[in-house]
């Protein structure tokens, strides 16, 4: 089963998230006895359970694709429709009770799925159908093959005793995973700082209504609108260091213990299933197929990127020495954003605070909407009021809802919501949740249209100033919207392959590709207007931004390699004593990044990718190769060219996971994919 939530990569420690992940192997499902009484998901699980029993009860001579394999897909889609809203509230509801209910529901559903994936009688039913050697094509052939593969991966070829052991492990991993996420989103780290210690920050930082104070002391929290400006603008290094260290210690030692337990259990589960380690288990069903391919990918890239990273390091150290007057000064990770901003200003005439003035949120939404509507042939209609009037509850007053129509046929394609500002206990990064997938029901050919939600944490407006997005935030918005359209424009028949139901290391490609739009002068001219004067963004400013795009790109790429390699190390190396994740984190930091050594932290305690995306962080760089290559076509034909947009919609977005990612890209490109566009994207050729 998948939880389709895309997490954004940590470049600058953002992520992008999507919620339906491959939950455990297959479609793991629990049996009736296991639907806990009083579970918030009880009704949905009983309904799913009844459907499972129905599949098992079909007589041999009447067994068909639709009533067996198709019906299994129906069960998962139905369970998602019945419970996804409830599960989603765990991440976004201001109400603690609802968050708890959502988490409980997720835990019960995952437990049920684990059980069902290991039910002998259901497996027998599927095998009986497979044994008829049916002639299948396209999605159906793929769905049967995936179902059989999932059964193997969920341990159906093990002995009963081994399978019981595996079930126990998987349930414990699921339970601990939910605790891990909860500890992250409810972390309340603050750093008390005086106004003087916060020198260099823009006024908007202090105006923020979410900024807590105790007398003259500011209690700086770890949300993006508080954390990122300190990294970007605080000219007091001691403050930057203090806040950076606090950020890298979120989740605390208790979450270090939780994630280490999870990793240990994953190693045990992988071993039971006959894999060398969890990384081989996880990558088997992705583009890379095994951990060795991932490691070879990094080995090939690292020396290429190192050349640029060394140049970056020199440039940044020189900037720091010039700024501080200390000719011995060295570079630390809490310096990167600060000197990046300074260099942009001094060497490229790009003042990030000035840039923001051209990106008022409403203008960005208008721009994003008109670009995507004309590129892909769509029309969006805001229905927030109608939804409220109809009595459908929205989880917060900030939330806006839009319907998506095909502009040629008038067909209603789906719906998405925007929840864009931070608040207490809300999911802290940027993510897209696919709440319902495109689906043609095997039972009666009815079509369900997709529902997506974008959850971001952009600065709010104040009474005298609209919400002004940084260029990074605009990029994040476009990125997440790329996931959203992947969900909405799906034409896959089966839930399993709909929208973002692609290989995990391909899922970021469409959204990464869409980031390029906000680096194009002609595109920016269509919507970037000064919030006071309405004047379009000056060409010189855009030119400076584009020239500065590759500032520090080598070091940033190495930072991404670091996250990916830590994740791989956790899932390939035998777990050690308590604290082994911290040790690996420190050792690899010193090996992979050029920065000076830093005091001990445990960033993994708040590294949410470790649950759901495990052994998968590399996918951001991997899919960037495909994103960069796919983008070439737009570069040649025009970034606002509707023909290019419709071709892309048809050949990539509409098809979801109905074929392997590699074949998808090959079909779109009309040639083999190539790495050169990716290397140019990093600015390695300069
Ligand atoms: Zn993403």
Image (tube, helix red, strand yellow):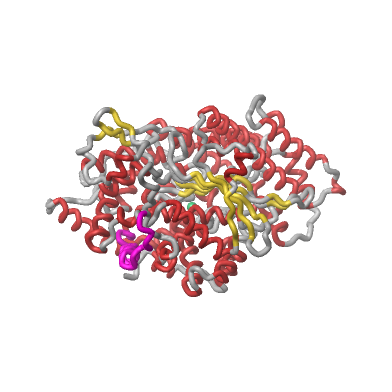
| Position of residue 393 measured from the top left corner of the image (x, y, whole percent) | 60, 36
Q: Is residue 158 visible?
A: no
| Position of residue 302 measured from the top left corner of the image (x, y, whole percent) | 36, 60
In the image, residue 553 above or below residue 231? below
- Does the magenta run of residues contain 548? yes
In the image, 173 versus 580, the foreground residue is: 173
Q: Quadrant of the C terminus?
A: bottom left
| Position of residue 398 measured from the top left corner of the image (x, y, whole percent) | 49, 41
Q: Indicate left or right for 556 with 346 as reference.
A: right
In the image, 351 versus 551, the foreground residue is: 351
Q: Which residues are magenta?
A: 532-554
| Position of residue 409 measured from the top left corner of the image (x, y, whole percent) | 68, 62
Q: Which residue does the image show at 67% across and 25% down from the upper left?
A: 37
Q: Which residue does the image show at 33% across and 60% down from the upper left?
A: 553
Q: Main secondary structure of the magenta part?
A: helix
Within the image, what quadrant is residue 668 found in? Answer: bottom right
């Amino acid at each position: 089963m998948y939880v389709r939530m895309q997490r954004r990569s940590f470049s600058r420690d953002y992520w992008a998230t999507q919620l339906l992940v491959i939950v455990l192997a297959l479609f793991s499902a629990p049996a009736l006895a296991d639907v806990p009484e009083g579970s918030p998901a009880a009704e949905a699980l009983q309904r799913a359970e009844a459907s499972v029993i129905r599949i098992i009860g079909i007589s041999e001579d009447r067994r068909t694709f639709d009533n067996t394999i198709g019906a299994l897909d129906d069960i998962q889609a139905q369970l998602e429709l019945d419970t996804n809203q409830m599960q989603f509230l765990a991440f976004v509801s201001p109400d603690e009770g609802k968050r708890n209910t959502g988490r409980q529901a997720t835990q019960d559903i995952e437990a049920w799925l684990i059980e069902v994936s290991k039910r002998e009688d259901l497996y027998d039913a599927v095998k009986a159908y497979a044994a008829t050697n049916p002639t299948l094509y396209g999605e159906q052939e793929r769905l049967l093959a995936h179902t059989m593969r999932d059964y193997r991966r969920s341990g159906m070829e093990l002995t009963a005793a081994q399978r019981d052991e595996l079930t126990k492990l998987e349930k414990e991993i699921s339970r601990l995973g939910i605790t891990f996420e909860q500890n992250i989103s409810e972390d309340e780290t603050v750093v008390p700082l005086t106004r003087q210690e916060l020198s260099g920050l823009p006024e908007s930082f202090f105006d923020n209504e979410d900024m807590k104070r105790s007398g003259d002391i500011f209690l700086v929290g770890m949300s993006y609108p508080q954390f990122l400006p300190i990294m970007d603008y605080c000219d007091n290094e001691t403050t930057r260091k203090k806040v950076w260290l606090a950020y890298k210690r979120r989740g605390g030692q208790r979450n270090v213990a939780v994630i280490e337990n999870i990793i240990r259990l994953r190693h045990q589960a992988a071993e039971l299933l006959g894999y060398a380690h969890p990384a081989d288990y996880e990558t088997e069903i992705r583009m890379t197929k095994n951990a060795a391919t991932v490691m070879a990918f990094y080995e090939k890239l690292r020396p290429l990127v190192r050349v640029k990273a060394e140049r970056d390091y020199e440039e940044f150290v020189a900037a720091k020495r010039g700024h501080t007057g200390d000719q011995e000064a060295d570079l630390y990770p809490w310096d990167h954003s600060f000197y990046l901003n300074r260099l942009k200003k001094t060497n490229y005439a790009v003042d990030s605070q000035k840039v923001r003035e051209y990106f008022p949120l409403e203008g960005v939404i208008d721009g994003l909407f008109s670009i995507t509507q004309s590129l892909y042939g769509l029309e969006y209609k805001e229905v927030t009021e109608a939804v409220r009037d109809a009595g459908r509850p929205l989880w917060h007053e900030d939330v806006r809802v839009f319907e998506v129509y095909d502009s040629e046929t008038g067909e209603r394609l789906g719906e998405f919501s925007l929840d864009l500002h931070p608040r207490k206990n809300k999911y802290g990064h940027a993510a897209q949740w696919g709440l319902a997938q495109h689906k043609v029901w095997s039972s009666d050919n009815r079509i369900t249209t997709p529902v997506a939600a974008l959850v971001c944490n952009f600065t709010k407006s104040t009474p005298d100033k609209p919400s002004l997005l940084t260029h990074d935030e605009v990029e994040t918005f476009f990125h997440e919207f790329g996931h959203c359209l992947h969900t909405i424009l799906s034409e896959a028949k089966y839930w399993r392959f709909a929208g973002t139901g692609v290989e995990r290391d391909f899922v970021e490609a469409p959204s990464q590709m869409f980031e390029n739009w906000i680096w194009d002068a002609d595109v920016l001219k269509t919507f970037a207007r000064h919030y006071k004067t309405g004047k379009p963004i000056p060409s010189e400013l855009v030119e400076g931004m584009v020239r500065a795009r590759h500032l520090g790109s080598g070091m940033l790429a190495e930072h991404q390699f670091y996250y990916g390699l830590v994740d791989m190390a956790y899932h390939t190396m035998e777990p050690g004593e308590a604290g082994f994740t911290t040790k690996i984190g420190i050792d690899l930091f010193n090996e992979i990044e050029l920065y000076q050594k830093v005091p001990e932290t445990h960033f993994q305690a708040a590294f949410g990718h470790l649950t759901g995306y495990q052994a998968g962080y590399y996918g951001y760089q991997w899919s960037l190769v495909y994103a960069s290559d796919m983008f070439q076509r737009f570069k040649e034909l025009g970034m606002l060219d509707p023909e290019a947009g419709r071709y892309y919609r048809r050949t990539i977005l509409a098809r979801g996971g109905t074929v392997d990612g590699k074949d998808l890209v090959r079909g779109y490109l009309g040639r083999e994919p190539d790495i050169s566009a990716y290397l140019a994207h990093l600015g390695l050729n300069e």
